Image (cartoon, grey):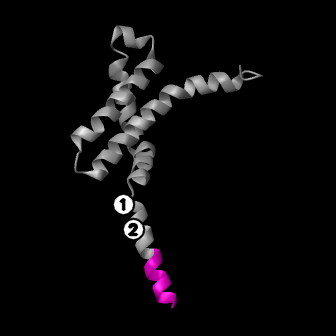
Amino acid sequence: MPASYAKAFAKSSTDVLKNEAIIAVLSASIVAPFIIPKINSLMSEVMILKDHQSIASFIAGLAIFSIAGTIFKGNAIGRAVIIGIAGAFILSALLPIYQNITTKGDGL
């Protein structure tokens, strides 16, 4: 009986690591910190994007997200990695707005 529980636990553990959502979150946490600063430094060299980095990061996230399905049609892991990077871009674009709202006393 305990052996069957151990086998079921091992199978579910490996299934978790194959889950596309888990891979996307891992990608946002592990891969994105290496890629986002490089792309942000490239975007800061463009005159109009230099003054609007949050908007540029948001648009870059949307662009990366929209091409994730076309580049990796049959590869769920590759698609999940790209979606994680796009999510990290969108999160980095929204964090200054969130911080601005939460640091004010009443939130408005």
Query: Which secondary structure is most common in the magenta stretch?
Result: helix
**Element carrying mark 1:** helix
Amino acid type, callout 2: Thr
95, above or below 32, in the image: above
Image quadrant in which you'd find residue 103: top right
x, y percentage for residue 4? 46, 86
- The residue most toward the bottom is 1
Q: Is 6 a magenta residue?
A: yes
Secondary structure under tag 2 reads helix
* Residue bearing the label numbered 1: 18
Task: Please determine whether, in this image, residue 71 is positioned above or below residue 59.
Answer: below
Chain part drawn in magenta: 1-9
Please say if the residues under marks 2 and 1 sit with CB atoms less than 8 Å apart.
yes
**Residue placed under numbered mark 2 in the picture:** 14
Measured Cα–Cα span from mark 2 to mark 1: 7 Å
Q: Position of residue 31 (x, y in %)?
A: 38, 43
Residue visible at 43% across and 81% down? 7
Q: Position of residue 66 (x, y in %)?
A: 32, 33
Instruction: Locate residue 29, reporting x and y percent.
Output: 45, 45
Residue at (37% x, 41% y) in the render: 83
The local crowd at label 1, few if under 14, some if 14 to 19, many if 20 or more residues have their Cα within 10 Å, is few
Q: Work out whether residue 42 or residue 76 is closer to the camera in this orientation and state it.
A: 76
Figure check: 71 above or below 103: below
User: What residue is shown at x 35% (from left), y 8% (from top)?
Assistant: 47
- The reply, left or right, for residue 91 in relation to residue 32 is right
